[in-house]
Amino acid sequence: MIRAIKLLLLGMFLLVACGNAGYAQDFQKGAEAYKKGDYATALRELKPLAEQGNAWAQRDLGVMYAEGQGVTQDYKEAAQWFRAAAEQGDAKAQFNLGLMYANGQGVTQDYKEAMKWYRKSAEKGHANAQNNLGNLCKRSLTDSIFERID
């Protein structure tokens, strides 16, 4: 009985390990293609991974849609991919989603929402998010002071 359980666990481990290895290889192929500017290959490799929930692939697809790399530029689509990765805790995606809210690209401009995503990214050490969060806080403070003066 114990031997059967050990074999079952070993089989499950191998299945997961082999599946993840293929997952990583596909992501690597997509990342390498992206770096070379081969966006068609990058899209072909990354999109299935993104659809399966890979946060890195989701973030990279967001960049491709935001920049129009291998796809028609589509800020709304970019925001959706950034959100999917950001909700999984990807700091770069959180920063990018914050930018989209700050600039009103693909989403309704919303500084509070931008601050929310910048804060999440900043807490993970993302320097640009820390900078942008500070700038938004400064802007918010300045605006509230001038509202009181008027």
Image (cartoon, rainbow, N blue to C red):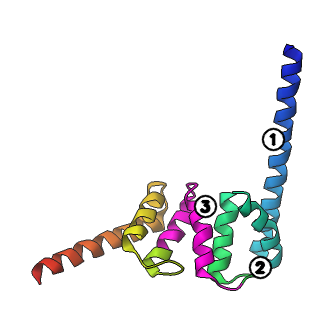
Marks 3/2: CA distance?
Answer: 22 Å
For badge 2, the amino acid type reads Gly
Q: Is residue 1 left or right of residue 87?
A: right
Classify mark 2: helix, strand or loop: loop
Q: Could you classify mark 2 by the number of other residues whose Cα lies within 10 Å: few (under 14), some (14-19), or many (20 or more)?
A: few
Residue indicated by mark 1: 16
In the rendered image, residue 57, in percent from the top left (x then y), is placed at 70, 63
For badge 1, the amino acid type reads Val
Marks 2/1: CA distance?
Answer: 32 Å
For badge 3, the amino acid type reads Ala
Mark 3 or 2: the one toward you:
3
Q: Could you classify mark 3 by the number of other residues whose Cα lies within 10 Å: few (under 14), some (14-19), or many (20 or more)?
A: many
Residue extending farthest to the left is: 149
Residue indicated by mark 3: 85
Classify mark 1: helix, strand or loop: helix
State the extent of the magenta-drawn residues as a range: 72-99
Classify mark 3: helix, strand or loop: helix
Q: Is residue 144 left or right of residue 88?
A: left
